[in-house]
Amino acid sequence: MVQENFEIKLPLFEGPFDLLLFFIERDELDIYDIPIAKITNDFLDYIHHLEKLNIEIASEFILVAATLMRVKSKMLLPRPQIDEQGNEIDPREELVRHLLEYKKYKSVIEDFHKLEEEQLMREKRGNLMKEIRVLAESGNVEAELQDVDLFKMMTVFEKVLRRQEAEKNKPVHQVIQYPYTMDGQREYILNQVNTKPRVSFTEIVEAFPTKIALIFNFLSILDLLALGKLSIQVGEGFNNFWVAKPESEEINSIL
């Protein structure tokens, strides 16, 4: 049986804001009311596809991915941020402002590109015979070698060495896929509160003693609180609280 070869074509974007605008236009989203969870998942999926194709991910894509996750975590917080006038601050406001600015400048750049193409199509009139003679002289290898001396060769060699050293020390961006997901940690926490009356936050931290796991678990708890699937019991001391079933479920189980 002959196995067919499948070719995957992935569109490449000039920058992360190009990618975000593509998602917004593709799904006909309101740029002033971006569904941050959906667009974050689409953005991370695109980065994961790049990783599978062994394409180096630029630092600005990683920065925007981190910004999207930060905005998503802020929207999960039960206490919204308030400005000096007492109005609630939308965590998406800064991202929307950057997107609108980028979209405005991008439209202007496209007009400049069209003007540049038109100018490139216009050739200046010149002395044709003189240009042909200059090209013929530049193609004379023996004439070029007559002007080469040891100092010029050493200068070129030094430039090559510097360029090689710069390429060798060029920073490499590497994205590490952590073995945690929001769905997986939410399921773990719900299983814990279903088997015990309540679970301390310290116990959850000790089960996954890494910084990234702490972030995943904390965001999962906030998400479950927002969905009404958890309740929190605050104790004394620093970061001392328990998670348990919602109060309505506890009352029903007693009755």
Image (cartoon, grey):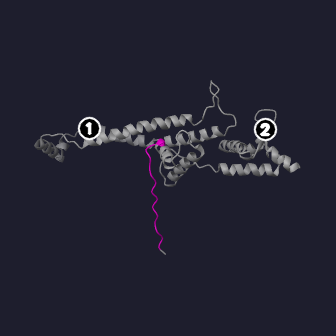
Residue 84's disc is none
At mark 2, the secondary structure is strand
Q: Position of residue 101 (x, y in %)?
A: 46, 35
**Which residue shows up at 30% across the image and 39% down it?**
115
Snapshot quadrant of residue 122: top left
Compared across the picture, whether 60 is left or right of 252 comes to left
Residue type, numbered disc 1: Lys
Q: Nearer the viewer, residue 40 or 161?
A: 40
Q: What residue type is labelled 2?
A: Phe
Residue 121 appears in which quarter of the rendering? top left
What residue appears at the point 57 percent right and 45 percent down from the top-left corner?
A: 40
Mark number displayed over residue 152: 1
Q: What residue would you read off at disc 2?
A: 241
Q: Is residue 8 magenta?
A: yes
Residue 12 rendering spot, x and y as whole percentages: 44, 49
Q: Nearer the viewer, mark 1 or mark 2?
A: 2
Give the mark nearest the N terminus, 1 or 2: 1
Query: What segment is highlighted magenta in the picture?
Result: 2-17
Left or right for 194, reference 143: right
Secondary structure mainly formed by the magenta segment: loop
Residue 171 visible to an observer of this rendering:
no
32 or 177, nearer to the observer:
32
